[in-house]
Image: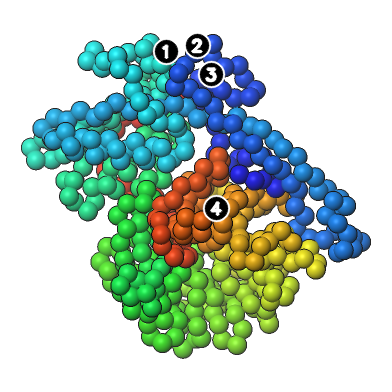
């Protein structure tokens, strides 16, 4: 993970558990016991201060080394990833295969949360017949232990799980959750919700397993058209949701996760449609007869939308989708203005504009009611750069976007950057280092980012953890575009006991 001008603080790194000693961090002392399963993840972080605009009085021809405030150095941080063991799930009135299936889904979800290091091999001598042996697991070097039972009672299925804190030798939390049959379309999502609850118990922050990712790609069997697909966050259950037999692009999740807005060319002119995922019904959004409409984005309250409206110029406009009225111009002029995205509170917008020249699109921010745009992406006169695809974090004042930084850009090769607006010093965090990377979108945890990538072994949809730089491929061998990560999808209920107060 390459970082320009900042460490990884504030991006969901290691966090001390309240009331529990923190272990494996560079500023603390490691527990004296030797633990075969314990290790800290060390991340080497190159740091560069990147100026977003040319300082006054500085010639554009001066070498970068002479630009005041620019320096290159290395930071080393130990991000402690706590070892997490998951015992094989028991079954009562259910087949062992179902227990193994549920166990596998939960284990992968916890691994993909990037909050834990899942212990792959369990010791041969463990025995849970007499309850959890905290001393044994403490000697083995495990911080967390999960036990579970898949049971079938009077035709109903349940998953019961217990999370044990080995450091404090106590049960942290337990819960009992309903499960549909393994062949039910909602089975995997129900298990994902349990995984997210486990992450919440251990960290205080809910997981992101019960989410989905939308994107468009050439339709299978009809490569001349592009359609919208969605996939679970772990890469399973990919399915097509539009059948326009044309170009269906730029999917955007509604704030409640029940709908997708997207642009379709099926009427002959690009217009914005809204698809109700539960029923498959759709409606056209936006004023009739008003140019070409692209790149929709919902306001956080869900009743308003911004999009790009192209007539003679490309403008950013807002529209009241709840009442079907009130088109308002937000960003216009002779330059291109496109790809708007709301901040988490709806008070500001990030968008792309070519007002510095059509060959150097840049990312700007401005008040969501309109106002003076402020340049966000790095720009130096005569060197330019190419930046697009902004998305505002759902939990912080950070914007992720794709592009090439000044004269380091290779044509057709872009990277994923994060700009933290609260720091006030034009710092950028670069998350990718290889291939081409575009169309980033935040997960609801404000830590993970999905994007479209090209690598030497093919193209696909990828996820990167902004805290550690760990990257995984979600969908392989597809020419995808316009990825968008859903909010956490609706819960299916269940009874649970919350963690004890003070933990």
Q: In the displayed structure, does residue 395 sit left or right of residue 461? A: right
**Which residue does the image show at 64% across and 66% down from the upper left?**
411
- CB atoms at circles 1 and 4 under 8 Å apart? no
- The residue identified by callout 2 is 33
First of labels 1, 4 by sequence position: 1
Name the element at disc 4: loop
Is residue 405 depicted above or below 496 in this figure?
Answer: below
At which x and y percent is residue 178? 21, 40
- CB atoms at circles 1 and 2 under 8 Å apart? yes
At which x and y percent is residue 399? 60, 55
Q: Residues within 10 Å of mark 2 (few under 14, many from 20)?
A: few
Badge number at residue 393: 4
First of labels 1, 3 by sequence position: 3
In this view, the mark in front (1 or 4): 1
First of labels 1, 2 by sequence position: 2
Quadrant in which the N terminus appears: top right
At which x and y percent is residue 231? 35, 56
First of labels 3, 2 by sequence position: 3
Badge number at residue 95: none
Distance, label 3 to label 2, CA atoms, is 14 Å
- The residue identified by callout 1 is 139
Q: Residues within 10 Å of mark 4 (few under 14, many from 20)?
A: many
Q: Which quadrant of the figure has residue 137?
A: top left
* Res 242 seen here: no
Q: Which quadrant of the figure has residue 221?
A: bottom left
Q: Which quadrant of the figure has residue 258?
A: bottom left
Q: Nearer the viewer, residue 312 or 498?
A: 312
At which x and y percent is residue 204? 45, 34
- The residue identified by callout 3 is 21
**Which residue does the image show at 32% across and 51% down from the upper left?**
236
First of labels 4, 3 by sequence position: 3
């Amino acid at each position: 993970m390459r970082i320009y001008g900042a460490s990884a603080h504030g991006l969901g790194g290691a966090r001390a558990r309240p009331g529990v000693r923190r272990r494996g961090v560079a500023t603390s002392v490691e527990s004296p016991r030797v633990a075969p399963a314990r290790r800290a993840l060390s991340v080497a972080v190159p740091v560069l201060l990147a100026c977003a605009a040319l300082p006054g009085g500085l010639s554009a021809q001066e070498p970068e080394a002479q630009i005041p405030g620019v320096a290159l150095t290395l930071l080393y941080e130990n991000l402690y990833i706590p070892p997490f063991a998951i015992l094989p799930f028991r079954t009562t009135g259910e087949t062992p295969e179902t227990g193994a299936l549920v166990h596998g889904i939960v284990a992968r979800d916890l691994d993909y949360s990037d909050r834990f290091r899942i212990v792959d091999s369990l010791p041969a001598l463990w025995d849970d017949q007499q309850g959890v042996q905290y001393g044994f697991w403490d000697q083995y070097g495990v911080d967390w232990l999960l036990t579970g039972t898949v049971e079938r009672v009077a035709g109903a299925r349940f998953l019961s799980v217990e999370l044990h804190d080995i450091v404090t030798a106590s049960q942290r939390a337990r819960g009992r959750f309903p499960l549909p049959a393994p062949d039910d379309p909602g089975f995997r999502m129900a298990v994902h919700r349990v995984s997210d609850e486990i992450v919440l118990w251990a960290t205080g922050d809910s997981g992101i397993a019960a989410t989905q990712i939308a994107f468009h790609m050439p339709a299978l069997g009809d490569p001349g058209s592009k359609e919208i697909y969605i996939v679970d966050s772990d890469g399973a259950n990919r399915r097509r949701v539009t059948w326009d037999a044309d170009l269906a692009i730029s999917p955007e999740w509604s704030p409640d996760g029940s709908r997708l807005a997207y642009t379709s060319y099926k009427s002959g002119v690009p217009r914005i449609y809204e698809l109700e995922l539960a029923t498959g019904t759709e409606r056209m959004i936006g004023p009739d007869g008003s140019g070409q409409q692209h790149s929709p984005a919902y306001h956080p309250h869900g009743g308003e939308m911004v999009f790009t409206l192209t007539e003679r110029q490309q403008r950013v406009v807002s529209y009241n989708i709840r009442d079907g009225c009130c088109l308002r111009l937000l960003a216009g002029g002779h330059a291109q203005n496109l790809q708007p995205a709301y901040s988490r509170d709806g008070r500001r917008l990030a968008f792309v504009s070519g007002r510095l020249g059509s060959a150097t699109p840049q990312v700007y921010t401005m008040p969501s009611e309109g106002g003076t745009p402020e340049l966000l992406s790095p720009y130096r006169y005569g060197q330019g750069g190419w930046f697009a695809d902004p998305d505002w974090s759902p939990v912080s004042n950070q914007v992720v976007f794709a592009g090439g930084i000044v004269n380091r850009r290779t044509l057709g090769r872009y990277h994923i950057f994060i700009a933290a607006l609260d720091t006030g010093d034009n710092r950028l965090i670069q998350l990718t280092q290889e291939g081409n990377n575009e169309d980033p979108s935040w997960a609801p945890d404000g830590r993970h980012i999905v994007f479209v990538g090209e690598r030497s072994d093919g193209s696909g949809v990828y996820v990167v953890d902004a805290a550690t730089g760990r990257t995984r491929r979600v969908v392989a061998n597809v020419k995808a575009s316009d990825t968008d990560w859903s909010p956490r999808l609706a819960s299916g209920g269940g009874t649970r006991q919350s963690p004890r107060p003070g933990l």
